[in-house]
Image (spheres, grey):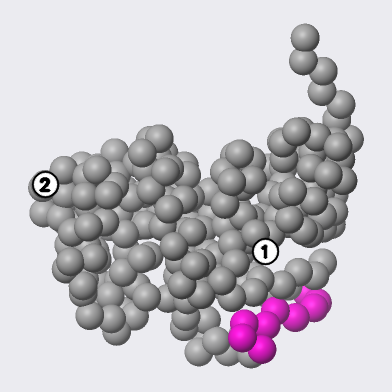
Amino acid sequence: MNFAITSGQICALVGLNGIGKTTIIKSILGIIFPDSGSILIKNNDYKNYSSRDDIFYLPEKFAPNPNLTAREYINFVLSFYKVELNNDKLNKLIKDFNLPENFLTSRIGKYSKGMTQKLGLIAMVLSNRNLWILDEPTSGLDPMGRYELKKVLLNHAKNGGSILFSSHILSDVEEISDQVVILHNTKIMYDGTASDLKLKYNTQNCEEAFMKLCGYELEFK
C-alpha cells in the first residue's frame, strides 16, 4: 500500500466501512504502528514525534471536554501548539459557520453535534498546522457548515497546506479533491484524480465509478 500527499493538495481517502481508512490515519499519527513498511512526513520517519508536530487531527467522533467553554478549549489547543490567538480570524470563523453570539462562552456539553464539529474545525484553522487530517469531517454538519468546511479546506490548500480526509460523501470528494485514493479488499485500487476516475469507469460521477470499482452494477429505472 503506497501513496503520497503533496503540498497544496487535498487527498480524499475513500472506501467501504471497515476497509482500513481510520487505521491508515491512526498509523500516520503514530497511534498504532504497522507491522511493515514506512511512513514519511516531510521525508522524516513518522515515529519521530517532531515530524508530527505540524499535524492537526480531527477525528470522526470529536469529543472535547464537555465542561469547557469553546474559548477555553480553543485556548488549550493553541497553547499546546504554541500559537497566539488571532481574534479577528476567530470572530470571522464564528460568523462564517453561522454560530450564535454566546458560542465562545457556552459549555461544550450543551452543543449539538454539528456545533461541536464546527468547534473542532475552528480550532484546526487557528492551529496554523500545515497538514490537516480529518476523519469524516462533514459528520453532523448542516448544509451551510458543509459549504464553509469545503471553503476552508480549499483555502488551506491554496495557501500551500496539505489535507487528508476520509469521506463517504463522494459528491464532496469529487468537488474539492485533487487526489482520490480508493481502498478495496485491503488494497489501494485507485490513486488519481476524480476526473480520471470517472473517465476510467465511463461514469457521470465518482459515486457510480466507486460502485463499479467495487464490482457493483447499478441500474436506475
Can the viewer see residue 136 in this picture? Answer: yes
Q: Which residue range is magenta in the image? A: 35-43
**Amino acid type of the residue that numbered disc 2 sits on in the rendered structure:** Glu
Residue occupying the point 34% across, 73% down: 127
| Residue 33 drawn above or below residue 68 | below
Residue occupying the point 16% across, 49% down: 103
> What mark, if any, has residue 110 been given in the picture?
none
Residue occupying the point 65% across, 59% down: 178
In the picture of the structure, the residue carrying the numbered disc 1 is: 24
Q: Horizontal and vertical percent for residue 1?
A: 82, 67
Residue occupying the point 18% across, 66% down: 88
Q: Horizontal and vertical percent for residue 51?
A: 55, 86
**Amino acid type of the residue that numbered disc 1 sits on in the rendered structure:** Ile
Q: Horizontal and vertical percent for residue 206?
A: 72, 40
Q: Quadrant of residue 30?
A: bottom right
Mark 1 against mark 2, which lies toward the viewer?
A: 2
> What mark, if any, has residue 101 been given in the picture?
2
Q: Quadrant of the C terminus?
A: top right
